[in-house]
Image (tube, rainbow, N blue to C red):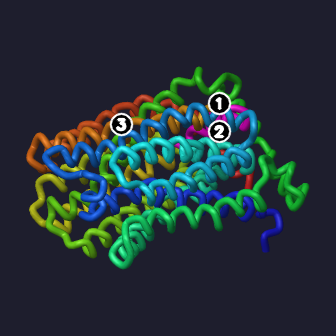
Amino acid sequence: MLNGQKRWLYIAVPIFFFWFFGQIDKVGISIIQTDPEFLNALGMTGDDKNAKIGLLSFVFTIAYGVSNLFWGFIIDKLGARKTAIAGLFVWTLTMIVSGLANSYEMFLVSRVILGFGEGMMIPVSGKFISSWFNKRELGRAQASWLTGNYLGPAIGAIVLVLVISSLHWQAAFFMLAAFNLFINIPMFIFMTRNTPEEHPRISKEELAFIRQSDDEEKEGNSSVNKSFTQDYRFWIVWFGMLVCSFLFFGISIWLPTYLIEAKGFEKEGMSSITSLSWLFALGFVLVCGFLADKTRRPSLMASILFSMTAVFLTVAVFIPNPIIAGICMGLAMGCQGGVFHLSNMLMVKYSTPETAGRAAGLIGFTNIMGGFSSYIMGWLRDLSGGDFSTSIAMLIFAAILGLGAYIFSIKKEAAELHLTPLSAQKIQA
């Protein structure tokens, strides 16, 4: 039943678990930072405790964003497979060090190293998708790994609360290290190859389909003959991802704290709404993956998602019901999950298999804004006596900026669609 579809097994499945466990590593700190024992053990107390908490995500995302540029060039030289294995070993070691940390400074350094190790995730995924899938499959191929991106934290939020409650906060880090060591690393070693040509179990027919090109689309799209850096739409996507990272990390990192301290939820209720929020993001990814391939209007869809984000955040500020406010925050985060998916799909569209690593590295660099968002939100909370209103107002303004950026690419996207109205029918996935 996998005849002609083995790319989905050998590439999509490892990348799914790559992100499933990687995102728990990355955002698990948002759950762990609600544990009083963790905060006391590492000295995150006092009037500046929110700034200290925000600094953890700040240093991680700075390292994560900057290292994307480095990894992007390395991937184009060494290939996605070796790069993924190297990065996995780095962040597995970092999880162990995090569990052994006995000071705030030691834990802070471990977050920097983790950011460097995980910085290859977007370039690796972009390189694999660009090399292994037909251009008409980009939406579904991206959704296959972005599913892990959001399903991981959705399940991980509940698991981490149970582990911390039953054992200790250190046990959560040791568990995450084990996931990488015994699941992720073996998958990349034994299942993946850099290109389908290198894989012994890919048939000639499947390879021919992967490499099949759509000549009419090339004729209608002049950008294929120039570098992605010369296409202004790539930089619109890049700016949109800056905003998306600012919004997504700001909401996701502080959501558990928001639910407990601002809305009065117990840990069980917090973990339920946090998990639901990640499921919202997963839902938006799956819907956007389907609609992007069908409508071929990803820029229009991104504009709509930024608009919805602003609306949901505004409702969360003014509505008194804590459950509805929490759900609206989750829906706003979900919308940005959809934007993240569309941005990565557009990145692959505007680049080539040879330049996909560098293009993804530039896109991944935008995660640096997530660090600023998490730190600024903590700083604003300290200034406001713990209130979230000012922070959320800042996020609303950011969503409007994202909407404004994508509006400039909608017209050209529509014009290209009219130039090749029948091309989408010529290649069957």
Q: Report the residue marked by disc 3.
A: 402
Q: Which residue is drawn at 52% across and 38% down?
A: 364
Q: What is the magenta range?
A: 343-357
- The tag earlier along the polypeptide, 2 or 1, is 1
Q: Which of marks 3 and 2 is in front?
A: 3
Could you tell me if residue 423 is visible in this image? Answer: no
Q: Report the residue marked by disc 2.
A: 420
> Three-letter amino acid code at disc 2?
Thr
> Measured from the top left, where is residue 162 in percent x and y?
37, 76
Could you say whether the residue bearing mark 3 is in a helix, strand or loop? Answer: helix
**In the shown orientation, is residue 379 left or right of residue 140?**
left
* Quarter of the image that includes the N terminus: bottom right
- The tag earlier along the polypeptide, 3 or 1, is 1
> Measured from the top left, where is residue 368 in percent x and y?
42, 36
Pointer 2: residues within 10 angstroms few (<14), some, or many (20+)?
Answer: some
Vertical comparison of 98 with 322: above or below:
above
Pointer 1: residues within 10 angstroms few (<14), some, or many (20+)?
Answer: some
The answer to whether the residues at label 2 and label 1 have Cβ atoms under 8 Å apart is yes
The answer to whether the residues at label 3 and label 1 have Cβ atoms under 8 Å apart is no
Vertical comparison of 36 with 81: above or below:
below
Main secondary-structure element of the magenta-colored stretch = helix
> Three-letter amino acid code at disc 1?
Asn
> Measured from the top left, where is residue 234 in percent x and y?
53, 30
Distance of label 3 from label 2 (alpha carbons): 28 Å
**In the image, residue 350 lies in the stretch drawn in magenta:** yes
Q: Report the residue marked by disc 1.
A: 221
